[in-house]
Image: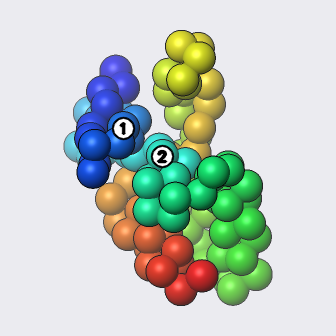
Amino acid sequence: MCPVKLFENRKVRTFWDEAEQQWYFSVIDVIEILTGSSIPKRYWSDLKKKLSSEGSEVYEKIVRLKMKAEDGKMRITDCANTQQLFRIIQSIAKS
């Protein structure tokens, strides 16, 4: 199940992992909200490269889950748990 959460009146796709007892959040959705980027996928792509070059292990821990896209189709998207998401947010602030 992929419920949608709202943050500043914007949608963030989420997934509750029952086995791990934790939430996963669509990285693209969060990046779009925090940066205002018109192309959040490109922003995330550039940020992944930057994190890798800095030796960060955040991207290695990203989970790819199928979530409902704007076109209504289920598409694979990069997702992060709360701890990983905080690290990504910190990296956005430094960009």
**Coloration of the structure image:** rainbow
How many marks the image carries: the answer is: 2
x 27%, y 51%: residue: 8
Image side of residue 6 versus residue 94, left or right? left
Q: In this view, does 2 lie above or below 17?
A: above
Q: Position of residue 92 (x, y in %)?
A: 52, 74
Q: Which amino acid does label 2 sit on?
A: Asp
Q: Residue at x 44, y 62 (%)?
A: 34
Tell me which amino acid carries mark 1.
Lys
Q: Can you say which quadrant of the picture contains the N terminus?
A: top left
Query: What kind of element bears circle 1?
Result: strand
For residue 11, which numbered disc appears in the image? 1
Left or right of 47 in this view: 83:
left
Q: What element carries label 2?
A: helix
Q: Nearer the viewer, residue 31 or 19?
A: 31
In the picture as drawn, the residue positioned furthest to the top comes out as: 72
Q: What x and y, as percent, mark residue 80?
A: 45, 53
Callouts 2 and 1 close, C-beta under 8 Å: yes
Q: Is residue 2 left or right of residue 47?
A: left
Above or below, comparing residue 67 to residue 39 in the picture: above
